Image (cartoon, grey):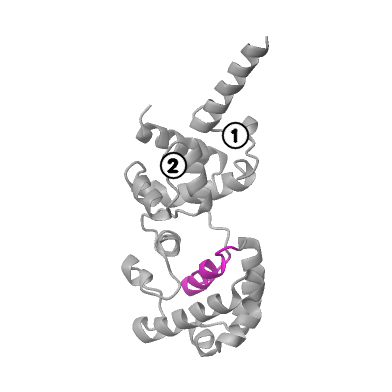
C-alpha cells in the first residue's frame, strides 16, 4: 500500500470514529484563539479554557488586553506555565494586531507568523479553524500518530512532518484530520500506553502490525 493510499484510509476511518472534528479550545473571536494557542504550549486545552474565561472576562477586547501590563496578564495566565514568557508574547501580539492590522487577525499565513509567539502550528490552526483554509497542525499528537501509523518515518521535527503530510493528504482534509489525531491520541493512541486492541486503525497501523507480528513470532518459539 502506498503512503497516499494509507493516508486516505486513515482519513476515512477517523472520520467515522470522530465525526465532529473540532478544536477543543473554546473561543468566540479569532484573537481569543490566537491567545489560547500561545497558552496551550506545554499545557492542556482544558486548563487553558478555564484560565481564559477569567482572562477574557477582565480583558474582553484586543484593545483591553493590549493595554494590560505583562505583569497583569501573567497573574492570570500563570497556571498555564511559562507565565512571564507567554504573558509577554500575548501583550506584544495584541499590540501588533492593533498597530499593523487594526485589531483584526490577518488571514495570511506569513502575516500570522510575524506575530509575536506565533509559530507554524498556531498559524495553521488559525488558518484552518478561523478562515477555513487548508491547514496541517503538526502538534505532538499528529507527530506521534503519523510516525506510529507509518504516514511518516522517524520524523519528529514539526515542520518536516507538516511538509511530508502536505504531499499525501488532500488539502481539504488536513485541518479536520489533525483535530481527529488529537481526539484519537487522547482516547486511544496514548503516548505511553496505546490501546491497540480497540484502535480502528490497528490493521493498517505499521507499528501495531509490527508488534503483532513480533508477538506471534514469540508465541511460536514458546510452543
Question: Is 29 within the magenta?
Answer: yes
Residue 199: mark = 1
Quadrant the C terminus occupies: top right
Q: Secondary structure at mark 1?
A: loop
Vertical position of residue 160 compared to residue 75: above or below: above
Q: Is residue 92 left or right of residue 102?
A: right
Quarter of the image holding residue 169? Answer: top left
Vertical position of residue 38 compared to residue 193: above or below: below
Q: Secondary structure at mark 2?
A: loop
Mark 1 surroundings within 10 Å by alpha-carbon count, few (fewer than 14), some (14 through 19), many (20 or more): some
Q: Nearer the viewer, residue 59 or 190?
A: 190
Looking at the image, tell me whether mark 1 or mark 2 is earlier in sequence order: 2
Residue pictured at 67% horizontal, 13% vertical: 222
Residue pictured at 54% horizontal, 44% vertical: 19
According to the image, label 2 marks what residue? 154
- Distance of mark 1 from mark 2, alpha carbons? 21 Å
Vertical position of residue 150 compared to residue 216: above or below: below
Q: Which residues are magenta?
A: 26-42
Q: Is residue 113 left or right of residue 213?
A: left
The location of residue 211, given as percent across then percent down, is: 57, 27
Residue pictured at 50% horizontal, 35% vertical: 13
Disc 1 vs disc 2: which is toward the camera?
Answer: 2
Residue 215: mark = none
The location of residue 161, given as percent across then percent down, is: 40, 49
Amino acid at each position: 500500500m502506498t503512503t497516499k493510499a494509507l493516508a486516505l484510509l486513515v482519513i476515512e476511518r477517523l472520520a467515522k470514529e470522530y465525526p465532529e472534528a473540532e478544536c477543543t479550545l473554546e473561543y468566540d473571536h479569532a484573537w481569543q484563539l490566537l491567545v489560547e494557542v500561545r497558552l496551550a504550549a506545554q499545557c492542556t486545552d482544558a486548563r487553558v479554557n478555564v484560565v481564559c474565561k477569567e482572562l477574557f472576562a477582565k480583558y474582553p477586547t484586543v484593545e483591553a488586553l493590549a493595554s494590560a501590563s505583562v505583569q497583569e496578564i501573567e497573574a492570570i495566565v500563570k497556571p498555564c506555565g511559562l507565565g512571564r514568557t507567554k504573558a509577554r508574547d500575548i501583550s506584544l501580539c495584541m499590540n501588533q494586531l492593533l498597530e499593523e492590522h487594526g485589531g483584526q487577525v490577518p488571514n495570511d499565513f506569513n502575516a500570522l507568523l510575524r506575530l509575536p509567539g506565533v509559530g507554524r502550528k498556531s498559524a495553521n490552526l488559525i488558518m484552518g479553524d478561523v478562515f477555513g483554509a487548508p491547514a496541517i497542525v503538526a502538534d505532538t499528537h499528529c507527530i506521534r500518530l503519523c510516525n506510529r501509523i507509518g504516514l511518516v518515518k522517524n520524523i519528529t521535527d514539526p515542520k518536516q512532518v507538516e511538509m511530508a503530510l502536505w504531499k499525501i493528504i488532500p488539502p481539504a482534509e488536513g485541518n479536520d484530520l489533525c483535530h481527529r489525531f488529537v481526539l484519537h491520541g487522547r482516547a486511544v493512541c496514548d503516548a505511553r500506553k496505546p490501546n491497540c486492541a480497540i484502535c480502528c486503525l490497528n490493521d493498517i497501523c505499521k507499528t501495531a502490525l509490527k508488534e503483532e507480528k513480533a508477538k506471534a513470532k514469540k508465541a511460536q518459539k514458546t510452543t
